[in-house]
Amino acid sequence: NAGVTQTPKFQVLKTGQSMTLQCAQDMNHEYMSWYRQDPGMGLRLIHYSVGAGITDQGEVPNGYNVSRSTTEDFPLRLLSAAPSQTSVYFCASSPGTGRDTQYFGPGTRLTVL
Amino acid sequence: AQKVTQAQTEISVVEKEDVTLDCVYETRDTTYYLFWYKQPPSGELVFLIRRNSFDEQNEISGRYSWNFQKSTSSFNFTITASQVVDSAVYFCALYERGSRLTFGEGTQLTVNP
């Protein structure tokens, strides 16, 4: 049981490049979400999904896309990377809604030059 | 709007001291959930506790205890006889029905030998 996995662990991009952060969970959780962590700002919700085929925006969705074609996977796409997207990204999953305990992946540290 | 305030940005103690991390929240709902997470230097987010708004009983788990007081909208976390391994950033978070999980900015705890 791997829990929540994220790849890559580290990534450096140039401004304007696109990339996909991968997230997978093997706990059959319906709810998955993406957060970014910036110094002094805690974690902020980017996008979330309450089940396969259903996604919605969080607090800071601009510049990011998501899709949920399966229960297990919830990739986060950066369309055109900007230095403001330099951050640590965490994926999380929980059995139900956000009221349930969320289990976090190890994070991806992204630097945009 | 829901909000979580962790006024203590950094706390430094000497090993074996007791330390309390404060968490004050704002919500308009009567049904909500509070969480504490630990982020050690390795970077992962570790779930510590979940509490719903109808359960005001204090919780103790080993050296950890939590004091939930609805009258003051606080959910404080105390570590008794702190250890170096307790050094981490601690986040308090609030979930309100129909909304999203909102994190405080975190408190950096350093326990010195």
Image (spheres, rainbow, N blue to C red):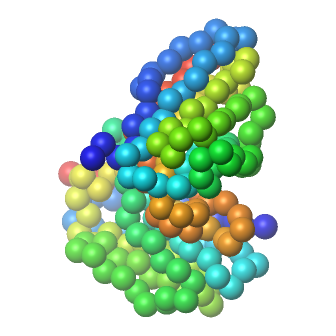
Front one among B63 and B9: B63
Pinpoint residue B56: horizontal percent, then vertical percent.
49, 89
Front one among A67 and A22: A67
For residue A80, say whether it is visible.
Answer: yes
Pinpoint residue B75: horizontal percent, then vertical percent.
52, 76
Q: Is residue A94 above or below residue B73?
A: above
For residue A36, say whether it is visible.
Answer: no
Which quadrant would residue A12 be assigned to in this image? Answer: top right
Residue at 74% x, 46% y is A57
Decide if residue A88 is on the left or right side of residue B32: left
Residue at 53% x, 41% y is A70
Pinpoint residue B51: horizontal percent, then vertical percent.
48, 77
Decide if residue A86 is on the left or right side of residue A107: right
Front one among A84 and B83: A84
Residue at 67% x, 71% y is B96
Q: Number of callouts in the render?
A: 0
Residue at 64% x, 27% y is A77
**Quarter containing the C terminus of chain A:** top right
Pinpoint residue A35: horizontal percent, then vertical percent.
59, 43
Q: Is residue B68 above or below residue B101?
A: below
Q: Is residue A91 above or below residue B107?
A: above
Which quadrant would residue A40 be assigned to in this image? Answer: top right
Q: Is residue A41 above or below residue A66?
A: below
